[in-house]
Amino acid sequence: MRGLGAPESAVDLASMAVVCGLFAFAGGLAEDFTKRVQVRLRLLLTFGSAILGFFLLDARITELRLPGFDWALQFTFFSIALTLFAVGGFSQAVNIVDGFNGLAGVVALLFLGAIAYVARAVGDEPIMWCALMLGAAIAGFLVLNFPRGLLFLGDGGAYLIGFLIAEFALMLVHRNTEVSPWFALTLLSYPIVETIFSMYRKRMLRGQSPGDPDGLHLHMLIHKRLVRRYCAHKGGHDRVWCNALTSPFLWVMALIGVVPAVLFWDRTEALQGAMLAFIALYVWLYWRIVRFRVPRALVMRRAMARPALDTADAAPQ
């Protein structure tokens, strides 16, 4: 990337970030090959990467602009604990939303574009170039991934990309005090809310371990309740096309968090309001879809006359 104008400091920073992320990548890659690596172990390995990032990259959470929390975050122990939770959780979140061709890749591009924009606005060119370099790599991957799915991220790719996005966002906020810490939370709200809600749904509503897989993530419900009906109406022969057709719905969902994060990156109160609005929208949309009451604005026109799907996808009790 030096030939394209990226300063050496950005290349060094990106290289160090990738080195720090090797533990996270290794856990995901091992799961890709063996299908036997538990979520807990993958999270522990990602925590190892986050520890390296904390000390080697200075990617850490030191304020949230919330009473009480900022006092606690003055102590290194609490700062490390929250940083590990945030980085590990977001890496897992990217893996969760990596369910359809182009979904995680385009969502990652949206996040990286926003990080690059804000980094440029505050003059942090190393972070800007790091985001652009990772974005360029993902764009190359998407050429083969969307729509035909000739190449997949796998758990290894999802964990590494999630880790790097989290690190760049944390570094941007920590290095530039004018950027609100709620910029990162609002920007990444789609995978964050998806993961937290999934944990609640599995533990509280279904009595499962939060690490157990299920077919009730929002992107899966959109595929079952909206896209699959449309594909069935057209004959349902091209499964690859139906797979790819699901992703644009979630790109829009991610944009609902990205747009206010970019517009109000230095205004904490506005970002907090946007985050609360996103949570309310997500919960409302999820419960409408899971109970076969899909908002008419989302129903694909050719499928509106079709009867509801079979009850095998019944809502959780």
Image (spheres, rainbow, N blue to C red):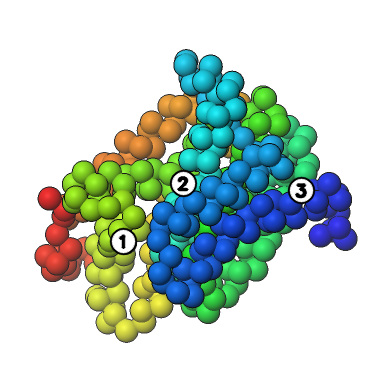
Mark 1 vs mark 2: which is more N-terminal?
Answer: 2
The amino acid beneath tag 3 is Leu
- Disc 1 to disc 2, C-alpha distance: 16 Å
Q: Amino acid at mark 1?
A: Pro
Can I make out residue 116 in this image?
yes
Q: CA distance from mark 3 to mark 2?
A: 23 Å
**Where is residue 147 shown, x and y percent of the image?**
49, 73
In the image, 97 versus 305, the foreground residue is 97
Report the residue that reaches farthest toward the bottom. Answer: 237
100 lies left or right of 206: right
- Rendered image quadrant of residue 83: top right
Q: Residue under circle 2?
A: 89
Marks 1,3: beta carbons within 8 A? no
| Quarter the N terminus occupies | bottom right
Circle 3 sits on which residue? 13
Q: Nearer the viewer, residue 118 or 296?
A: 118
Across and down, in percent, residue 49 comes to 60, 50
The residue to which callout 1 is attached is 213
Residue occupying the point 63% across, 59% down: 22
